[in-house]
Image (cartoon, rainbow, N blue to C red):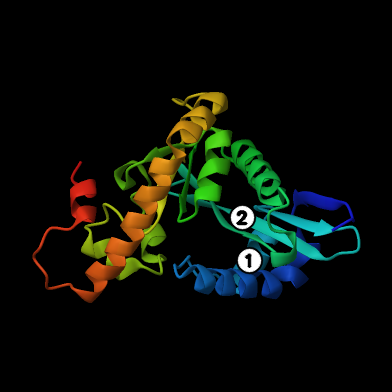
């Protein structure tokens, strides 16, 4: 942890990290009890070769973190996906630095696209807020079926008519957005509310999966009807 961490745009020389990255993505999702879209080492390697990913590593080559870009809806929407940090480097601030670099890279490659993210973590919500993202409904995201079909919680998503799921949606619209200082302050003021809502949503959705035939209106259904 004493070594300098390098954060840069990935390239073809980084493909040897791809298996380590996808393994950590899978184990991290299992530990959280929620899913992320599964990606193969080949898919991650392709993103590196295309220059659509950001990688972090130490000076001696130890892998630290990763994130990649996906474009949807004829490049009208861009997702910064697969953010992952090696366990030994978590809570060091590196995730925030990776998110900032991948956000800037997205703006460089797709200057007019709306940038969005789906997250189950309050820490990622905080980072996104500091970049200018706002919490939004799922209807404001891409309608590209290929994007939604990759969701590992697809059955849950479709049971809610694609209006909500375990993740919280956030969006940055380059044509209409608040300044990062404003969105960061809003998150600071409402962070406890966001955390409670995310916890309620997760617990209620898990219960609904076990009681699909129940007709009783849940607290989650009340929230989603607002």
Q: Which residue is drawn at 27% across and 62% down?
A: 204
Q: Where is mark 1, residue-wise?
A: 44
Q: Is 82 located above or below residue 180 in the figure?
A: below
SS under mark 2: strand
Q: Which residue is drawn at 34% across and 41% down?
A: 140
- Residue 68's disc is 2
- Point out residue 166 in the picture as x, y percentages from the top left corner: 37, 59
SS under mark 1: helix
- Residue 217's disc is none
Q: Residue at x 77, y 72 (%)?
A: 16
Q: Do the residues labelled 2 and 1 touch (CB within 8 Å)?
A: yes
Q: Which comes before the other along the chain, label 2 or label 1? A: 1
- Point out residue 91 in the picture as x, y percentages from the top left corner: 68, 54
- Point out residue 18 in the picture as x, y percentages from the top left corner: 69, 70
Label 2, label 1: how far apart the Cα atoms are: 8 Å
Left or right, 126 with reference to 35: right
């Amino acid at each position: 942890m004493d070594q300098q961490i390098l954060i840069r745009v990935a390239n073809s020389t980084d493909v040897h990290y791809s298996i380590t990255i996808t393994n950590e993505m899978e184990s991290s999702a299992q530990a959280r009890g929620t899913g992320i879209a599964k990606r193969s080492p080949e898919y991650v390697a392709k993103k590196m070769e295309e220059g659509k990913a950001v990688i972090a590593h130490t000076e001696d080559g130890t892998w630290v973190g990763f994130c990649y870009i996906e474009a949807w809806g004829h490049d009208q929407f861009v997702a910064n996906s697969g953010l992952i940090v090696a366990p030994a480097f978590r809570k060091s601030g590196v995730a925030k630095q990776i998110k900032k670099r991948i956000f800037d890279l997205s703006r460089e490659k797709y200057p007019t696209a709306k940038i969005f993210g789906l997250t189950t973590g309050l820490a990622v919500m905080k980072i996104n807020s500091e970049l200018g993202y706002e919490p939004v409904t799922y209807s404001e995201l891409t309608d590209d079926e290929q994007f939604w079909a990759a969701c590992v919680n697809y059955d849950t998503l479709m049971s809610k008519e694609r209006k909500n799921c375990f993740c919280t949606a956030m969006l940055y619209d380059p044509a209409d957005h608040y300044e990062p200082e404003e969105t960061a302050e809003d998150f600071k003021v409402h962070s406890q509310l966001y955390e409670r809502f995310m916890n309620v949503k997760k617990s209620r959705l898990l219960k609904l999966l076990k009681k699909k035939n129940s007709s009783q209106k849940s607290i989650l259904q009340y929230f989603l009807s607002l």
